[in-house]
Image (cartoon, grey):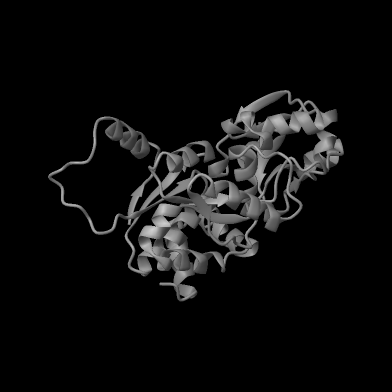
Amino acid sequence: MRVLHTTVALALALLLASCGGSDPEQPARAKAPVRIGTMNFTESQILGELYGQALQAKGLRVELQSAVGPREITNRALRQGLLDMYPEYIGVLLSEVHKVEARPKSAAEAYRLAKRLEERRDFTLLDPTKLSNDNALAVKQSFGRKNDVAGIPDLKRERAVLGAAPEFRTRFEGLIGLERLYGLKFRRFEPVNIGKGLQYPALNDGKIDVAVVFTTDPQLARGRYTVLRDPEGVFAVNHVAPLISQKVLKDNGPKLAAALDAVSALLTTPVMRAMNAKVDIDKRTPREVADDFLRAQSLK
């Protein structure tokens, strides 16, 4: 499996595409590899490995472009034809890509809406997983007790420092929604690489007061942090589903969707949290963790 670790590969592909077409001297391949991208955080990278290795086990060729970047970059790469698929989070897909800010009444309704919107663009969503990884705000328990902070509305009394990824500034599931629905303004915004879990050391050291977290982060199980209630629903429920080109599905036949759906059927929130811990806490690689899981489930 070919792995590209940064956005450099995509930038190079854009440059080459702008310089001309394909080489007429190069023989055509019978079947192009399925190009899978991932976003720049642990869980997405594990998911990319799970889907990619499952396809390889069925004899399909795969190129995995790992840690392409945040959704804004990964989704653009998909639209521009530089990727064929990536594991997507349905709630954020609706709010940040399709600008649907009103939350659907259920996860099933959100999935149907997202799938319908994607199919207008020649993409689709395959079967959703039972895994839901939601964005949230968290504080140290000691900060919450001292300042009587248990929910996002309580932050309005504080002059807090927020740690989040840079793209959080411009998202509805970010500063825009927090200001619009809660009237929140933070004393300072501190860019933090939450994809590498650096918000937790920053909280521990007092560099930030509030952090954006993922609800499947294994660090949250240690009992040191409080995930803040979100009564206004700034943060969506985020079930995962593969977002994929309809052309690629057609070109590869039913075994591609079947292989991906077989993986998705096994993914739950506790299962994913355990795999995240093996990478973030035990320091194993996403590739190793995915390989172990697929073998244990007889998918390799």
Where is residue 189? Give x, y as percent.
66, 26
Where is residue 51? Give x, y as percent.
45, 60
**Quadrant position of residue 49:** bottom left
Residue shown at 42%/64% (left/top)? 256
Where is residue 142? Give x, y as percent.
79, 42
Where is residue 21? Give x, y as percent.
24, 37
Residue shown at 74%/26% (left/top)? 186
Left or right? Give the position of 150 relative to 101: right
The residue closer to the viewer here, 162 or 235, is 235
**From the viewer's perspective, is residue 264 above or below residue 243?**
below
**From the viewer's perspective, is residue 188 above or below residue 104?**
above
Outermost residue, top side: 187
Residue shown at 56%/56% (left/top)? 241
**Quadrant position of residue 125:** bottom right
Residue shown at 43%/40% (left/top)? 77
The residue closer to the viewer here, 65 or 287, is 65
Quadrant location, the N terminus: bottom left
**From the viewer's perspective, is residue 6 above or below residue 125?**
above
Quadrant location, the C terminus: bottom left
The residue closer to the viewer here, 291 or 149, is 291
Outermost residue, bottom side: 298
Outermost residue, left side: 25
